Amino acid sequence: MGSYPPPGPGPGPGGVGQRIEEAIELIEMEVRHAAAYINAAVIPQVRAESISALRNVANSLRNFADRLDRQQGQQPGPQQSSQQSSQQSSQQGPQQGPPPPPPQTPRT
């Protein structure tokens, strides 16, 4: 039959406790490296892709609103005069497409 703890000399000074402390130090170092990588590479990439996606959504919504305006203009009922709509479009200025997305950073 076995006994617990096993017979023999117990852990000496710096045995199990020292190994646990070393493991904790290594884990902390790895966590610091992972956080630095996320801050340096992942977050900027996510921001760039999010900005691009939001601009695409904004363009889609603008096109949808324009289509709704055209459909409303084709239906009978209260409409804006052509003079009012031309004034509004001249106040808005020329519409430009979204700027090109920023260059992607290489992943390591």
Image (cartoon, rainbow, N blue to C red):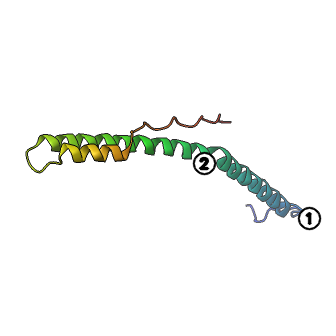
Comes first in the chain, label 1 or label 2: 1
Element assignment for label 1: loop
- Nearer to the camera, 33 or 59: 59
Which mark lies nearer to you, 1 or 2? 2
Density class for disc 1 (Cα within 10 Å; few <14, some 14-19, many ≥20) is few
Q: Which residue is mark 2?
A: 43
Q: Residue at x 18, y 48 (%)?
A: 80
The image quadrant that residue 41 belongs to is top right
Density class for disc 2 (Cα within 10 Å; few <14, some 14-19, many ≥20) is few
Q: Which residue is mark 1?
A: 13
Q: Give the left or right position of residue 8, taking residue 50 as reference.
A: right
Q: Residue at x 24, y 40 (%)?
A: 67
Image coords of residue 97 (percent x, y): 43, 36
Tell which residue pokes out farthest to the right in this image: 13
The kind of residue tagged 1 is: Pro
The image quadrant that residue 44 belongs to is top right
Q: Give the left or right position of residue 95, taking residue 18 as reference.
A: left
Q: Which quarter of the figure is the C terminus placed in?
A: top right
**Vertical order, 26 against 71 (above or below):** below
The kind of residue tagged 2 is: Ile
Image coords of residue 52 (percent x, y): 48, 41
Q: Which quarter of the figure is the N terminus placed in?
A: bottom right
Image coords of residue 26 (percent x, y): 78, 53
Q: Residue at x 78, y 65 (%)?
A: 5
**Vertical order, 11 against 101 (above or below):** below
Q: Label 1 vs label 2: CA separation?
A: 44 Å
- Nearer to the camera, 12 or 102: 102
The image quadrant that residue 73 belongs to is top left
Image coords of residue 31 (percent x, y): 71, 54
